[in-house]
């Protein structure tokens, strides 16, 4: 009997039911009722809470016989104390479900509130990959995601990124149990987004797709999704900023955002490590940080995977596809949508670069980068981006 050659085996897992299209939010009440929900808590941020879409959603759910309560105490990068207050609101309402309504901050907070509604101890006891981390082994309340931005893709993610109140260090809580039971992705909810937010969240979506495609490891499913996400963003990001009422462009960007978040279960890379440090040190918006850093950081990877840059350039229709052409396109895109090209333009000081590099090297994202990255490399990248 001949011996078999050893083979590599892989496990793939993909998320959650998604209802997509303009106006799809009108189906939420019926969906919740069908699943036995009576008392949902709507978790959203301060910005969304003052918009008509929040009061309209509460009114429509109440008219359908649901008893809603709102928790609107999310702002900035979400921190643990906000989650703690949300859990109090969940219990005070005797809620049986969570509706996350908003951008990545609100959706990550909604996941963490749902988790801690039924799990004991401290939220950070459940931090991913920490020695002695507690298992997420209890049932989590039914929760649905209703994104209002096209950036993080948190609605299809299985992790919540919550910061420490004191240090502002981001902690990742991860479990397939954190996946939403359903996503209602209604691009009409993004029509009123200001141009700056459309641009920075759109760059977040694009960065997810690009870094997922470049990430090392074998995952052709994620690679295919990432490439299509890049194509959609290349087609529609500028238009969604310059023609905000264009529903087709808004739909493309909402889909690109979800595709990026699905694809990055393969991994991300050094751009995200740079951006996470900028959020920690300077409280810079995550999408804006990615947008500023993407071209500066990713040049580090050209020698490792030149053919992947060429494939991305071909995917977005560049005439002479190459890494150089891809970076020229990125810089032009940033200029078109108003993303600064340099860190100095957003108030970063040169004397912060040392601290930024120390935090970036500790961030886990660059472990999946196709080329290894040292603290010296991060120093050089930040200086080049300054």
Image: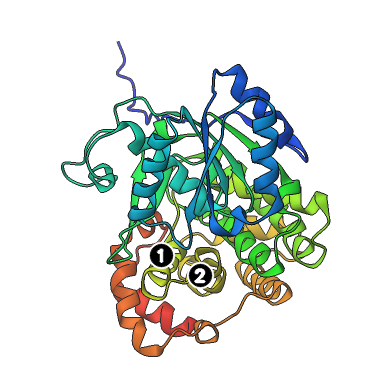
The quadrant of the picture occupied by the N terminus is top left
Residue 357, percent across and down?
Answer: 33, 75
Instruction: Using the image as rendered, state which of residue 365 and residue 169 is in the foreground.
Output: 169
At 34% from the left and 89% from the top, the residue drawn is 351
Q: Is mark 2 on a helix, strand or loop?
A: helix
**Gap between marks 1 and 2 measured at Cα:** 8 Å
Residue 190 on image: x %, y %: 71, 53
In the rendered view, would you say 107 is above or below 211?
Answer: above
Residue depicted at 77% across the width and 38% down the height: 23
* Lateral position of residue 343 relative to residue 127, left or right: right
Label drawn at residue 276: 1
Q: Is residue 336 left or right of residue 79?
A: right
Q: Is residue 308 visible?
A: no
Quadrant housing residue 184: top right
Q: How many marks?
A: 2
Left or right: residue 139 compared with residue 240: left
Question: Can you identify the residue that label 2 sits on?
Answer: 289
* Mark 2 surroundings: few (<14), some (14-19) or many (≥20) residues within 10 A: many
Please say if the residues under marks 1 and 2 sit with CB atoms less than 8 Å apart.
yes
Residue 317 position within the rendered picture, expressed as x and y whole percent measured from the top left: 76, 58
Q: Where is residue 160 in the image (x, y as percent from the top left)?
A: 41, 46
Q: How dense is the environment of label 1, judged by Cα within 10 Å: few (below 14), some, or many (20 and up)? A: many
Q: In this view, does 306 lie to the left or right of 137?
A: right
> SS class of the residue under badge 1?
helix
User: By what rule are the colours in the image chosen?
Assistant: rainbow
Is residue 365 in view? yes
For image coordinates 75% across by 52% down, the residue present is 250
């Amino acid at each position: 009997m001949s011996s078999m050659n050893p083979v590599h085996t892989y496990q793939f897992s993909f998320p959650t039911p998604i209802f997509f299209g303009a106006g799809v939010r009108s189906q939420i009440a019926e969906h919740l009722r069908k699943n036995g929900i009576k008392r949902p808590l709507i978790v959203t941020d301060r910005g969304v809470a003052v918009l008509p879409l929040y009061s309209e959603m509460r009114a429509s759910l109440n008219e359908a016989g649901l008893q809603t309560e709102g928790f609107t105490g999310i702002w900035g990068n979400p921190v643990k104390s906000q989650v703690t207050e949300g859990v109090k609101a969940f219990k005070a309402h005797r809620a049986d479900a969570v509706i996350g309504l908003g951008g990545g901050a609100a959706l990550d907070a909604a996941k963490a509130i749902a988790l801690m509604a039924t799990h004991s101890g401290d939220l950070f006891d459940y931090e991913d990959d920490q020695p002695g981390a507690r298992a997420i082994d209890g049932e989590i309340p039914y929760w649905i995601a209703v994104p209002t931005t096209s950036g993080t893709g948190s609605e299809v993610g299985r992790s919540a990124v919550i910061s420490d109140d004191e240090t502002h260090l981001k902690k990742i809580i991860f479990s397939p149990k954190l996946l939403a039971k359903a996503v209602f992705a209604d691009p009409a909810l993004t029509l009123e987004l200001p141009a700056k937010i459309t641009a920075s969240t759109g760059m977040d979506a694009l960065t997810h797709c690009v870094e997922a495609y470049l990430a090392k490891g074998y995952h052709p499913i994620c690679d295919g999704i990432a490439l299509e996400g890049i194509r959609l963003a290349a087609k529609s990001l500028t238009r969604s900023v310059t023609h905000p009422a264009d529903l087709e462009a808004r739909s493309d960007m909402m889909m690109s955002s979800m595709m990026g978040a699905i694809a990055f279960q393969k991994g991300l890379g050094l751009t995200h490590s740079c951006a996470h440090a900028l959020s920690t040190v300077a409280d810079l918006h995550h999408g804006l940080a990615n947008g500023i850093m993407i071209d500066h950081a990713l040049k580090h990877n050209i020698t490792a995977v030149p053919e992947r840059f060429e494939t991305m350039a071909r995917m977005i229709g560049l005439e002479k596809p190459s890494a150089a052409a891809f970076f020229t396109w990125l810089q032009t895109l940033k200029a078109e949508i108003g993303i600064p090209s340099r860190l100095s333009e957003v108030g970063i000081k040169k004397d912060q670069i040392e601290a930024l590099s120390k935090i970036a090297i500790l961030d886990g994202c660059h472990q999946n980068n196709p080329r290894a990255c040292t603290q010296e490399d991060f120093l050089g990248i930040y200086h080049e981006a300054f």
